[in-house]
Image: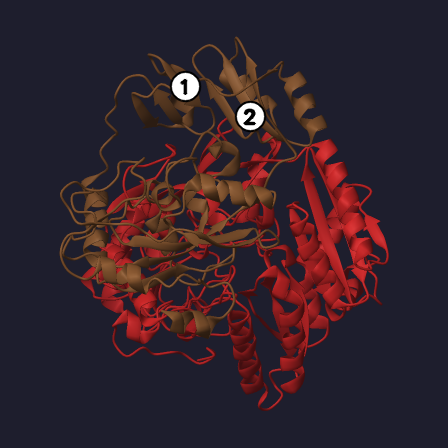
Chain colours: A red, B brown
Amino acid sequence: MNEALAADLRAALAPDRVRTNATELGLYGRDASNIEGSTAVVCFPLTTSEVQAAVRAAHRHGVAFVARGAGTGLAGGAIPLDHALVIATTKMNRVLSVDPVNRMAWVEPGVLNLDLTRQVAHLGLHFAPDPSSQQSCSIGGNVANNSGGPHCLSDGVTASHVLGLEVVLSDGSVVQFGGEAPEEDGLDLRGAFVGSEGMFGIATKVLVRLTQNAPTVKTMLMDFSSVEAGAQTVSAIIAAGMVPAALEMMDQLCVQAVEAYIHAGLPLDAAAVLLVEVAGLPAGVAADTERIVEIGRLHGAGAVRIAKDEAERALLWKGRKTAFGAIARIKPNYYLHDTVVPRRMLPEVLRQVYEIAERHQLLVMNVFHAGDGNLHPLLVFDKREPGVMERVHAAGEEIVRASVAAGGVLSGEHGIGLEKRDFMPMMFAPADLAAQAAMRRGFDPSGLANPFKVLPSAAACGDVQHVPDGAWV
Amino acid sequence: MRRRAARTGWGVGVIDLDAFAAEVGAEGPVTITGVGSRGGAVPGVRTVQAPSGIQWVQPDEMIVCCGAGTPVDELVAVLAEHHQTAALPCGGTVGGALSLGQADLRRLGYGPVRDVLLQARYVSAAGEVVKAGGPTVKNVSGFDLCRLLVGSRGALGFLGEVILRTRPVAQCSQWFHREAGEPFEVFTQLHRPVSVLWDGTGVWALLEGHPDDVSAQAREASLAAVDGPPPLPGGSRRSIAPASIATIPGRFVAEVGVGTVHHAEPWVPPRRSQRVLDLALALKHEFDPLGRLNPGIDV
């Protein structure tokens, strides 16, 4: 608690939107990761000028500030460290304007991802990035993490869908990056800001690109007797020059958990299932569907189930999107990983993932964006078991190392945050990290915007960093 | 830099950039040029050129690795052998296209140039080889330095080797025209057209996909097949809100749904706010404190 900061904030915002009670400070010290931080004050601005006032107050008191959306991040990016001020944007949740012809909308950062899609559905449009948390995650959080989702295979991640931003910088000034005009003069500050995990400032308005709904959609489920066969099918589909709207894979353990949860008639005996969605105009969709089924059969696909109607399609997707909830039936805790490997390396890296989990006596299930090579190994455990967290963290680190060694990257959509901060040198040399630190200094010379994230200590040149319990490092 | 390639293995970059880095050096003003088609070198300054050549093409990963000095047309020709293409404007070099960051007429469907660059290895103002980004399409490992490099006109570093996202070549690709057309009417009738142009009277559209879909779309929007887009006036390339193209005076070809306008008359782009200019300068200073890279080029 920081009474002087709280008093300043109460004067600038409204007293009931500045919270200092222990329960709330505790709640806002966490996100969806296993990491716990420490909060000085939580505030809930309603406008850009209130965000500006909060940032200025943090500055005056020399306190770090952390922007927070819905708190669904998995890498600890929104965890306040060392008694930081949490600026929650959840109450800034209005869709400000929609241009249905040019397909763009100005929204506030607290708008929930799926709410935006629902609000523009009657125009035949949607917001393309669709993380599994889309019912609860916010657009501001999507911007901070450059979020993905199953349908990013054909449509790209958040960075491709953000045209402009209004940002409060760490010195309290309000700026606009990008906008309706397509090619702003000078550096692409909009592009640099997306994915900066709250370390370059706080987005207070976001101009998003909206995407036309496809007139025809075919969703199909193919089952395979081996994970390798499923993974090879994925590569073969892309190599044939097709980019499906989504290409998702679940392994047997995952299918069994999901089926017990939603009863969609998923094949319980298959080693892996592929969920493939093709979207577009009718002739192209029909031709691609036919070729994909053919490629699947060539790779040993057993049953091929094509959703007959929207209800069946929704059921198949429900299986994919509720996978993480279904896991609770097996063990009470899970640790979800997120790495990317070249598609052609999927069979090899998956083999290693199973081997790593077995060696650490952990259950692992895989449900992931196969088309992007974006793995999500899910380590399932009961944290009451003595010594299990050490094994979970050791296995996790090995999975990340195996992915990077296969030519992949540290994170596909969850971000670096605190979770993978100290893994950055696996992928980047000191000179590479120095360039990223230079970006950070350019945007935030004060270092008060969400400090101690993303950049390992040598690159950040900061003070000794406190890494809280729960982080791997 | 071979050390890094060996350590991180597959697909990370293959060109030995040490010679290029030595040439850029760490002292004195230096400028970079490709074939000079996009403005070329800063006059009166020692000039370097980036390595060229395609290192590998991986159609099943939809990526390609090449030297920044590779001509775009050569890249497109080699990708075509693999039924792939890259969303870069033709002519000049890959490095030049990325450094300018201006898309061609297909931007509506193919996206902006900034979405093409996945990984860059560039030479910094300190003469070091620096890697930005990673070789996969999906990647949120650290800050998006690649997007900052695209459009930076060589002011932050000189691109040496790049990994680019490719896309499959469409089965059918055809330009269409309608003599009198309201641009937004045609635009909203079409499903994800690659390009829609308007010159104040007529509408052009580039449609790609399955041949049956392309012809059905053209029929519904009363479009007739033509050889290509109209000639583009060369007075200025304007960037405006796409909603405001309907009211532009003069002779022009506007990209509907995008907001790029090819106009016969010159144009002065709107000035960014002082705080944004200061921020851009602060970034320039962080990356090139002595101002030695492409001196005089605005950020």
Q: Are marks 1 and 2 on the same chain?
A: yes
Label disc, if present, on residue B253 of the rendered structure: 1
Q: State whether residue A420 appears in this view.
A: no
**Screen quadrant of the C terminus of chain A:** bottom left
Label disc, if present, on residue A233 of the rendered structure: none
SS type, badge 1: strand
Q: Residues within 10 Å of mark 1 (few under 14, many from 20)?
A: many
The residue sitting at 46% across, 35% down in the picture is: A105
The answer to whether A183 appears left or right of B292 in the picture is right
Q: Quadrant of residue A218?
A: top right
Give me the C-alpha separation between circle 1 and circle 2.
14 Å
- Position above or below: B51 against A175: below
The answer to whether A124 appears left or right of B40 in the picture is right
Query: Number of numbered discs present?
Result: 2
Of all chains, the one bearing label 1 is B
Residue closer to the observer: A303 or B212: B212
Point out residue B142 in the picture as x, y percentages from the top left corner: 40, 62
Residue closer to the observer: B264 or A111: B264
Q: Residues within 10 Å of mark 2 (few under 14, many from 20)?
A: many
The residue sitting at 45% across, 46% down in the picture is: B115
The residue sitting at 63% across, 75% down in the picture is: A353
Q: Quadrant of residue B225?
A: top right
Residue lying farthest bottom? A386
Point out residue A7 in the picture as x, y percentages from the top left corner: 25, 61
Residue type pointed to by label 1: Val
Disc on the earlier residue, 1 or 2: 2
Residue type pointed to by label 2: Leu
